[in-house]
Amino acid sequence: MRLDVRHLELVVAIADCGSLRKAAARLHLTQPAVTTQLKRIEDHLGGALFLRAADGVRLTPAGQDFVQEARSMLTQLVTLERVTRRNAHSPCAPTRIAGIPAYHFGLLVSALKDNVTSRTIKETGTLTALLTTGELDVAVLRQFPGTPLSLPPNVGHRLLTREPLFVGVPERHPYAQETEVPLEALADDKWVMPEPDDSGMNAHFARECAAAGFEQRIAHFSNEAHIALTLIRESGAVCPLYPVGSTPPGVARLPITGNPLFREVVLAWRVDAPVAVRIDDLCRQVAAGYLRLVEESEVYARWWRNGGEAFAS
């Protein structure tokens, strides 16, 4: 027998979980398979790594030394993969992009022309991890007040837009014909909200509604825009809407007085990626493209001209 990475991962998993059953679940193995593998490892090493007890397992002194070295080796392997992957990414290779499903993402892909691969990813933690390991070169992320981004030193970042969140209301709503709506005027409405995620959006809404003197009455959760718009039109609910885009019949898109709800759309990039030297130009192109979208959105364009541009910049 010869120790390999799987053996190291198995022993570390048992140490982390404190039981063979939990380690088996973490490794997607059966408990008998984990028990058999551990016995083979201990037989090969000539001594026990764990003491068995009714409530689980504990490391022996030899086991503690083994796990310490195993963790170090596994960390080195991750580093080796990351460095090799980065070095293999030649200047001629496609720029690897991911980002939230926002207009800025599409504008960035367009600015980079043809030599690019892209995918949409909503989770902030996933985007940050892929940038950290070098699996992405550049990403479009979002941050909401109270949930700032946490990026490593090898990742640069820049604000693209501070984007207000408007609200969609049914055309029969008392404020549907107004140019804006105070947040507190929505206290008695039922809300459609996206499923909570790691962006902090829902927590931001809850705090701002509380500051306006009420608790949000969330009746529906949906991440699908067409479902949310249908619920606004048919059931009379209200829903946060991003400002860019057309508004379907039966729905009014309104700015919220004072812009209490907003997100910051952020461009982040690996400082060691070839695309890093193009960031200034890419930001200019994305900004120009976004301004064109603003002008195509009647409500947003009016908000932008009436002082919104200073808020968004």
Image: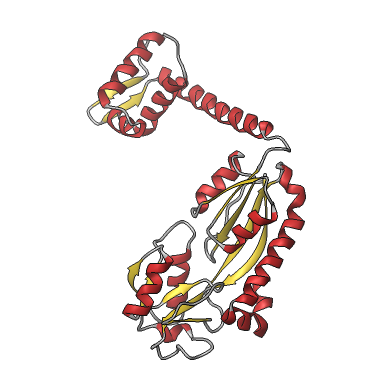
Q: Name the residue rendered at 42%, 71% in the picture.
A: 206
Q: Name the residue rendered at 77%, 48% in the picture.
A: 277
Above or below, 181 relative to 13: below
- Residue 163 in which image quadrant: bottom right
Drawn side of residue 155 relative to residue 213, left or right: right
Q: Name the residue rendered at 56%, 82% in the picture.
A: 258
- Residue 54 in which image quadrant: top left
Q: Name the residue rendered at 53%, 59% in the picture.
A: 101
Q: Nearer the viewer, residue 74 or 289?
A: 289
**Spot occupied by residue 195 in the image (x, y as percentages of width and height):** 39, 61
Above or below, 23 relative to 292: above
- Residue 249 in which image quadrant: bottom left
Q: Nearer the viewer, residue 213 or 25?
A: 25
Quarter containing the N terminus: top left
Drawn side of residue 52 relative to residue 92, left or right: left
Above or below, 59 relative to 295: above
**Spot occupied by residue 29 in the image (x, y as percentages of width and height):** 31, 28
Quarter containing the C terminus: bottom right
**Viewer can see residue 216:** no
**Spot occupied by residue 213 in the image (x, y as percentages of width and height):** 42, 82
